[in-house]
C-alpha cells in the first residue's frame, strides 16, 4: 500500500518511514503542513499518518482542508497532547484514529493495518486469493501453504493486486503505488515486475487486459 507520513521531527519521521516500509508499504514522507496539504490533494494514498504539530500549517487544518476537498483516505493522527477536547476535535475534523506520543511502533503499525482493512473488503490481516495467502502483519506470502520468496517491489505489487483483486489496474496506477512521488516513474518497468511475479505464482494468477492493464484472478472461485 502507499502511505503518506507527515511528521516534522526528523528522527521520528525517519523511524516511521523505516518501520512502515519494512512492513511492505511504499512510503512518502514530508515534514511541513503546506507540503502535506499539497501532496495529499494531488496524489492518491491508501492511508496517512499525520502529526498535529506541524510548521507552516498545522495538522488539524490540513485534515480539514483534505476532507473539505473530498479527500477520503484513512488518516491516523499523531499528537503530543492527550486532552479529550483535542481528540474530539480531530475526530470531528475527519480523522479515522489517533495515537498519543510517545507510542510503541508496533501499536502504530497495528492501527495502520486496521485502517487499511477498513478501507477495503479485508477484515483480517491475512488476505486470500485462491491458493495465495498474503499476511499484511508479517509481510509474508504463501502459495498452497508453502512460503513464497518475493522482493519488496514484488510484494508491494502483489499486495495492491490482492487488495483490489478482480479489478483492472493500469501500469501507471501500479507504478504510482510502487515508486515515491519525486522518483522517476517508468511504467514500463511494471511489465518486468509483473513478469517476475507471474513466474512465482500459479499459472493464470495475473491476467493481462490488453490496452488497460493487469488484474489478479481468483483461481479458487467458481467458474
Image (cartoon, rainbow, N blue to C red):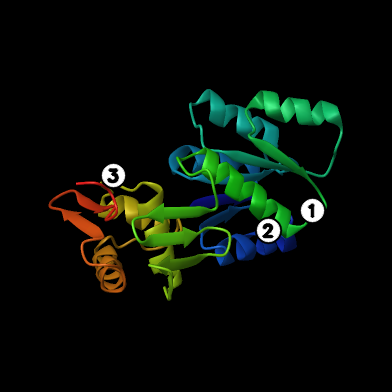
Q: Secondary structure at mark 1?
A: loop
Q: Quadrant of residue 201?
A: bottom left
Q: Position of residue 89 (x, y in %)?
A: 74, 26
**Residue found farthest to the left:** 210
Position in image of residue 167 (x %, y %): 28, 44
Which residue does the image show at 82% across and 44% down from the upper left? 80
Mark 3 or 1: in front is 3
Disc 1 residue crowd, few under 14, some 14–19, many 20+, Cα 10 Å: few
Residue nearest the viewer, comparing 188 with 47: 47
Q: Quadrant of residue 214?
A: bottom left
Question: Do labels 3 and 2 touch, CB within 8 Å?
Answer: no
Mark carried by residue 167 = 3
Q: Residue at x 51, y 55 (%)?
A: 126
- Report the side of 43 relative to 208 (left or right): right
Query: In what element is the residue under mark 2?
Result: helix
Q: Nearer the viewer, residue 172 or 131?
A: 131
Look at mark 2 in the image and give the residue it sits on: 13
CB under 8 Å between discs 3 and 1: no
Between the residue at mark 1 and the residue at mark 2, the CA separation in whole angstroms equals 13 Å
Q: Is residue 19 visible?
A: yes
Q: Nearer the viewer, mark 3 or mark 2?
A: 3
Q: Is residue 89 left or right of residue 196?
A: right
Give the CA separation, mark 3 to mark 2. 33 Å
Mark with earlier residue (1, 2): 2
Q: Which residue is mark 1?
A: 103
The location of residue 45, given as percent across then percent down, is: 48, 45
Total labels drawn: 3
Cα distance in 3D space between marks 3 and 1: 37 Å
Amino acid at each position: 500500500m502507499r502511505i503518506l507520513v507527515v511528521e516534522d521531527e526528523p528522527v521520528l519521521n525517519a523511524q516511521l518511514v523505516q518501520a512502515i516500509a519494512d512492513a511492505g508499504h511504499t512510503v512518502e514522507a514530508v515534514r511541513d503542513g503546506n507540503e502535506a496539504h499539497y501532496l495529499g490533494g494531488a496524489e492518491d494514498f491508501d492511508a496517512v499518518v499525520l502529526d498535529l504539530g506541524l510548521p507552516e500549517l498545522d495538522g488539524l487544518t490540513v485534515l480539514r482542508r483534505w476532507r473539505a476537498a473530498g479527500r477520503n483516505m484513512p488518516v491516523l493522527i499523531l499528537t503530543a497532547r492527550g486532552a479529550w477536547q483535542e481528540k474530539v476535535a480531530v475526530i470531528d475534523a475527519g480523522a479515522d484514529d489517533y495515537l498519543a506520543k510517545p507510542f510503541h511502533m508496533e501499536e502504530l503499525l497495528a492501527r495502520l493495518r486496521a485502517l487499511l482493512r477498513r478501507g477495503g473488503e479485508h477484515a483480517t490481516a491475512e488476505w486470500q486469493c485462491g491458493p495465495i495467502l498474503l499476511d499484511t502483519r508479517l509481510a509474508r506470502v504463501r502459495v498452497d501453504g508453502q512460503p513464497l520468496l518475493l522482493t519488496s517491489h514484488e510484494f508491494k505489487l502483489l499486495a495492491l493486486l490482492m487488495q483490489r483483486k478482480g479489478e483492472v489496474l493500469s501500469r501507471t496506477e501500479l507504478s504510482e503505488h510502487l515508486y515515491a512521488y519525486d522518483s522517476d516513474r517508468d511504467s514500463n518497468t511494471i511489465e518486468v515486475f509483473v513478469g517476475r511475479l507471474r513466474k512465482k505464482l500459479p499459472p493464470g494468477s495475473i491476467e493481462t487486459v490488453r490496452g488497460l492493464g493487469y488484474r489478479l484472478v481468483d483461481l479458487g472461485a467458481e467458474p
